[in-house]
Image: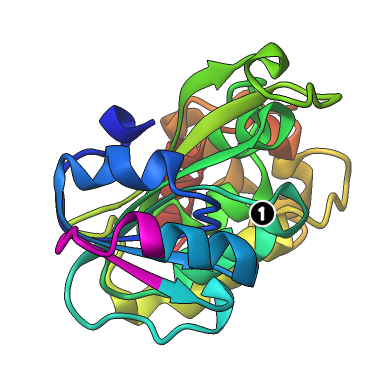
Amino acid sequence: MARAAGSHELLLEPGAGEGALTLALAESCARVVAYEIDPRYAGRLAVRTRDDDRIEVVRGDFLTTRVPREPFAVAGNIPYSITSRIVDWCLRAPALTSATLLTQLEYARKRSGDFGRWSKLTVLTWPGHSWELAGRVGRESFRPVPAVDSALLRITSRPVPLLDGGRDAAWREFVEYGFTGLGGSLRASLRMRYAPRRVDAAFAEARVERDAVVAFVHPDRWLTLFELLH
């Protein structure tokens, strides 16, 4: 997981526990800020790392922390019950460079397109972030053994967004409307809002099947359709 996270000047780790991952991350990062909400674990980790200048332990909720202004990364074996909240926090952080998170396998596959389909969140954020399934972790790797397998989900901020910021609202409206499912396919939905001939021409140029279901259209094709219809 530390190799997947990479090297960074500043890395935040949510859910540090007793620090098994914290120490590994510190080997390749100049500064690691480890957040742990359980005072017992936080205390043990603070004692364990008190002589390590690379590591700062914060006893508290990662989700309430102030977002750094300088470039930073996030990596952590996060509580699965708050995966969506941590992902949303990362996506809202302007200075985030990447987030490498251990999540349930199904969540990582859904967000990264590993099922061959893409979620609305993935498409909405695609102009600014890429999503990747960076590895799988079997349930037998944990004690006690959980009921589900896990995976490394890596979200990377694009240095140059695929759309300029002035069109963010139009992009969101376009994707939200496309995912309404009106008409049963993306083409049928868009033909209700745009001139049918323009929609058909855009689908042909973007090489999207005419009857493609919304979730099975790659985010890059969504961008092409958006550009052609706007």
User: Residue 141: image x %, image y %?
Assistant: 62, 16
Q: Quadrant of residue 32?
A: bottom left
| Above-or-below relation of 141 to 91 | above
Is residue 206 shown in magenta?
no
Quarter of the figure that contains the N terminus: top left
In the image: residue 33, left or right of residue 144: left
Q: Residue at left 75%, top 53%?
A: 179
Magenta part of the chain: 47-57
In the image: residue 181, left or right of residue 107: right
Secondary structure state at the residue bearing disc 1:
helix
Q: Residue at left 14%, top 64%?
A: 53
In the image: residue 119, left or right of residue 75: right
User: Residue 13: image x %, image y %?
Assistant: 41, 57
User: Residue 62: image x %, image y %?
Assistant: 53, 73
The local crowd at label 1, few if under 14, some if 14 to 19, many if 20 or more residues have their Cα within 10 Å, is some
Please name whichever residue, 128 or 196, is drawn nearer the observer in this view of the structure. Answer: 128
Work out whether residue 30 can be spotted. yes
Count up the numbered dots.
1
List the residue tagged with mark 1: 83
Quarter of the figure that contains the C terminus: bottom left
Q: Quadrant of residue 41?
A: bottom right
Q: Residue at left 73%, top 29%?
A: 106
User: Residue 144: image x %, image y %?
Assistant: 78, 26
Query: Label 1 sits on what residue type?
Result: Thr
Is residue 56 shown in magenta?
yes
